[in-house]
Amino acid sequence: MAAPPVSSAKFVLGVDIGTTSIKVVLLDSQSKNVVDSSSFPTNSVLNNDIHEHAKEQDPARIIAALDQCMDALPTEKLHNVKCIGVSGQMHGVIFWKSTTGCEWSTSNAGHTFRPQDVSQLITWQDGRCDTDFLSSLPKPESHLSVATGFGCASIFWYSRHRPEFLTEFNIAGTIQDYVVSMLCGLGGCVMTAQNAASWGYFNSTCSQWNTDVLKGAGFPIHLLPVPVQSGSKAGKTCSEWHGIPASTPVGAALGDFQCSVYSCMADRTDAVLNISTSAQLTFAMPADFSPPGEPDPLSPIAYFPYFGNSYLAVAAALNGGNIMATFVGMLTDWMKELGLEVSEAHVYSKLIQCALSQPSTDLHVTPTLLGERHDPTCLGLVSHISPTNLSLGHVTRAICRGILANLATMMPPHTLLAAGVKRIMGSGSALTRNEILRQEVVRTFPLPVVCGKDVDSAVGVAMFFSDKL
C-alpha cells in the first residue's frame, strides 16, 4: 500500500500572552484561515505582601499555560510551522539574567523551557507609582505620557525603593519579549516600537529611548531593550520547541492591542472596539499624521505606533471586562459569607440571563473602579438608585452600559464621525461572551457594529507575519 501523501501546507503560529490567559493559533499561510487554536487561563496572579498596590504575575505559571496551549495543537502541523509571531500584554516589565533566563528540558511533548533566574512580571495593572511619585519623574521627550504600570515607571520605582532588587538582573522586557528571547536564545532583548512606546520615555518618531533624560534622573539605562521596527525578525528558534523545528524564524514581539486591531480592521474607515480585561476604542490616523511633540496627560486619547510608521488614535480605558469580573467576584464572596458556594462561571451566566430580561434601566453606574490614566483619581459611582431598579438585571445592564459610556466619554461618537469612521469592528473576550455589552455598544455609538469571529491578538500576530512571508 502506498504511503499517504505528505501535506504541503505551511503554517504560521500566533501566540498571545494575555493578562489572564494564553491563546495560540495555527494560520494556514496560503488560505489565511485559522485551522487550529487553543487557549488556557494562566492563573498567574500573585499576592504581594510588599506593596498593597502591586500587581504581579508568576512567569512560571504563564509559561506552563503556554505549554498547555502548545500541547493541544496537532503535532504534525507544528512540524510545518514556518514562522512564529508573538504578541502580549503591553506596558508590563519582567527582568532576567543574560546568562540564564530559562532552562530547556525534553519530555514527551518535545523540547520546552522553564523560567530560571527571572523576576515576577510587574503588569500594566500595577498601581504602586502613585500621582506623587509620577510627578517626581522627569518629563518624557515623547508624545505619550507615563503612567503607573508602564515599564519605565516601574523600573524607576525599583531604582528608588528597592535598588538591590535590580542588581540581580541585567535584562528587562515585556513578557512577550521574554518569550521571544528564550525561544531564540538571545543574550539580550529586542523590543518593537509598539512595546517600547507602551513603556514610556520612547520617542516613536525617531525610534529611540530618551536616554539622556533617563540617565540624568538616575535610571539604569543598561536595562533598556534594543529598539527594532515592528515586523522585524528577532531571530530563529534555538531548539526544537513542541515539534516546531529548530531555526524557525521568530518575529520580534508585538503589542497585543495593535495585533487585535490588525486582525479585524478591514478598512481604514473602520474603528475597532476591543473589550477584554481592559477596553480600547481606536481608529487609524491619516498616513501623513505626526504625533504632537509633547504629551498631554489630561487627554483621554493617545496615539499608539501601529505598522509602517502609522499611528492609531486610541482611547485606552483601564476599566473593561475586569469590571464585570469584579462584580462577579463581589457577589461570589458575598454568597460565601452567607454560607453558599457558587462558581463564578455560574454567577456570570445567571447575570447575563437576568440582564437579557431587563432591556433597559434608569440606574446609572460609572464603573471607573481603577480610575483612568488621564484621570487616576476618578472612582466608581452609582446613582439614580430607586426601589424598582435594584434587581440583578438592572444592575448588570447598568454596569455594562457604564463601561461603554466611559469609553464614549473618552472618545465621543462625534470624534469617530469626524474622522470618517463608517463602522465599528468589535473584538475581545469580554465582548464576545457578553451579549449585554454588545447590545450597549449599538445603543452608545450611532454606527454599524460588527463582532467578528477569530478576532483577537493571536490571530492578528499570525496574520501580520503571514502577510510578510
Image (tube, helix red, strand yellow):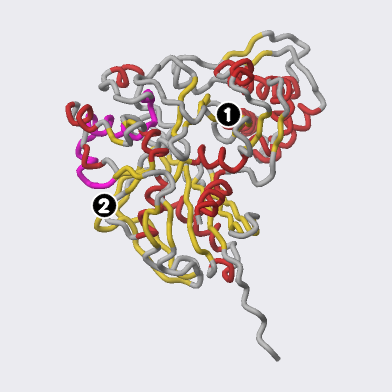
Dot placed on the residue nearer the N-terminal end, 1 or 2 = 2
Report the magenta residues as a range.
144-171
Q: Residue at x 39, y 31 (%)?
A: 149
Type of the residue with mark 2 = Lys
Queried whether the magenta region covers residue 98, the answer comes back as: no
Q: Dot 1, how many residues are within 10 Å of its Cα: few (below 14), some (14-19), or many (20+)?
A: many
Residue 364 figure quarter: top right
Residue designated by label 1:
320
Number of marks present in the image shown = 2
Q: Residue at x 65, y 58 (%)?
A: 31
Q: Considering only vertical position in the picture, is 410 above or below 331?
A: above
Residue 350 vs residue 96, the one in the foreground = 96
x, y percentage for residue 75? 57, 69
Q: Considering only vertical position in the picture, is 361 above or below 74?
A: above
Query: What is the C-alpha distance between the residues marked 1 and 2?
Result: 35 Å
Type of the residue with mark 1 = Gly
Residue farthest along the right direction in this orientation: 357
Residue designated by label 2:
97
